[in-house]
Amino acid sequence: MASLTTLKIEELLPASFTSPGLSEEEFLDLCAKFPDAMEAITGERPALPPRLSRLMTDPERFEILPNKLAAVQGYVTNHARLLQEGAA
């Protein structure tokens, strides 16, 4: 199914919806973020943007942490350092 253009979507949205300052790409990303609402408004389900096309098929990556504040803080601290070192 072809994706809706920004102008077509804006014609179908309620008058109370505005998107000040968003580029067309950002606006279409926003539409794709709420596919059920957009389908109810336009009758068509928006496609994911190309940069997110693998979102539903790539394996999930996550870590299970204990329900302890110190464990979460330590995890964030350790991973933030890794990111800083990798960016240098």
Image: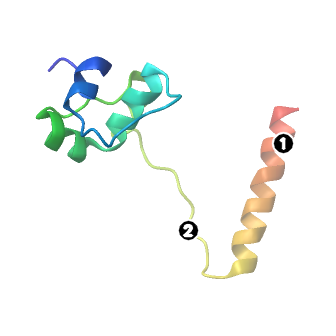
Q: Is residue 18 above or below residue 66?
A: above
Foreground of the two, 16 or 31: 16
Kindly report the distance in space between the C-alpha atoms of the residues bearing marks 1 and 2: 23 Å
Q: Secondary structure at mark 1?
A: helix
Q: Is residue 41 left or right of residue 50?
A: left
Residue type beneath disc 1: Gln
Q: Residue at x 42, y 44 (%)?
A: 59
The image quadrant of residue 66 is: bottom right
**Can the viewer see residue 21?**
yes
Foreground of the two, 22 or 86: 22
Whole-percent x and y of residue 25?
44, 22
Q: Secondary structure at mark 2?
A: loop
> What label does residue 27 carry, if any?
none
User: For the C terminus, which image quadrant?
Assistant: top right
Instruction: Name the residue tied to disc 1.
Output: 84
Q: Residues within 10 Å of mark 2 (few under 14, many from 20)?
A: few
Instruction: Name the residue tied to disc 2.
Output: 64
Q: Residue at x 24, y 40 (%)?
A: 14
